[in-house]
Image (tube, rainbow, N blue to C red):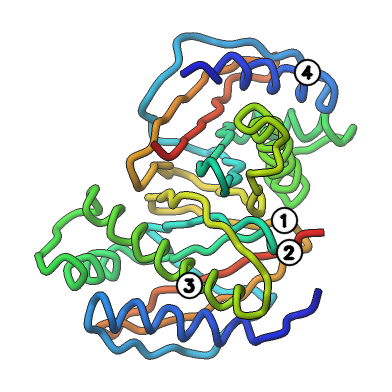
Amino acid sequence: MGDMFNVADEIITGTKDVFSTMLSVDLENEAIHENKKCDIQSNLTSMIGLGGGIRGLLAIHCPASVAKNITGAFLGMDVDDLDDDVKDAIGEIANMVAGNLKVSYAKTDISVELAIPTSIVGDSFYVSGIADANRIIVPFIMTNETFWVELMYVANS
Amino acid sequence: MDISKNIIESAQEIFSTMVMMEISVNGENMMTSIPLTESISGVIGMAGTHKGVLAIHIPNKVAMAITGSFLGMDVDEINEDVEDAVGELANMLGGNVKSILSENGKDIDLSLPTTITGQQYDFQPTKDAERIIIPFSCDAGEFTIDMQLEK
């Protein structure tokens, strides 16, 4: 199985679509990182597994202030802490971005199922996939700060 | 939750056959997690007729001992070998839980196994999920298995 479409492009359009539709925010992205190290500073990561045609993980990595800004835009209210509202909001966004990716894969006849989102909150943690997984990281800019959308995946044999 | 007994049996079988370690349940099941410090978590998602997340949360020292036993070598730091071993444990547990939840296991797909490593982090569900956390102990120390299923 090869990439019959550009996964990075699908991640970019899928994410921008969620932000413009649900948050009325026009996102800019920076250069993608493909299978190389990327310095991610996350205080809150929401991740959702993908199974079926591929085995993957879609993660949204946010520094604390961006997570709060995103939640504020999503829910229309100010947020002070990384509380349940923030975890639910970023988790829901991860779910929607993964949903868009599922539709993208379906167009190439690859059927993907979504698991449920979980959140990691902390000051110093990092997420790794298995050694031979493909890894695509897209940095996005929101209110002059960066957050990252990452897809790790292997083809399902 | 009924499946905790199945999870315990699966975990004991995997540890005994693959890791050469005996493990036992170490207390009551819990429903909420405690913050994790200097730990590594192996995580795998399940999708299909049942949706959920299964995680194994292991303090670094215990993870190094488990990896050493799994791979038959000395391990003195959290490196790629430890990440792969912990991810593989989640993968094997996920495979067993699949068959527990669905008769032939074919209606549930497993995601990519991943690991979270950190000094201090909180691992939490986002949506309404039924959650069960089972505490275990082995010679090297304690760890937990954390199973969340969409309601």
- Residue A130 placement (x, y as % from top left): 72, 56
- Residue B75 placement (x, y as % from top left): 78, 38
Q: Are marks 4 and 3 on the same chain?
A: no
Q: Which residue is mark 1?
A: A130
Which chain letter matches label 3? Answer: A
Seen in the picture, residue A122 relative to B2 is either above or below; the reply is: below
Image quadrant containing the C terminus of chain B: top left
Q: Residue at x 58, y 17 (%)?
A: B136
User: Is there a contact, CB below 8 Å, between mark 2 and mark 1?
Assistant: yes
Query: For the residue carrying disc 4, how many other residues have a C-alpha within 10 Å: few (<14), some (14-19), or many (20+)?
Result: some
| Of the two numbered discs 2 and 4 in the rendering, the one whose residue sits closer to the viewer | 2
Using the image as rendered, state which of residue A105 and residue A131 is in the foreground: A105
Residue A154 numbered tag: 2
User: Would residue B87 appear left or right of A147 to someone viewing this image?
Assistant: right
Q: Residue at x 62, y 22 (%)?
A: B7
Q: CA distance from mark 4 to mark 1?
A: 23 Å
Q: Which residue is mark 4?
A: B21
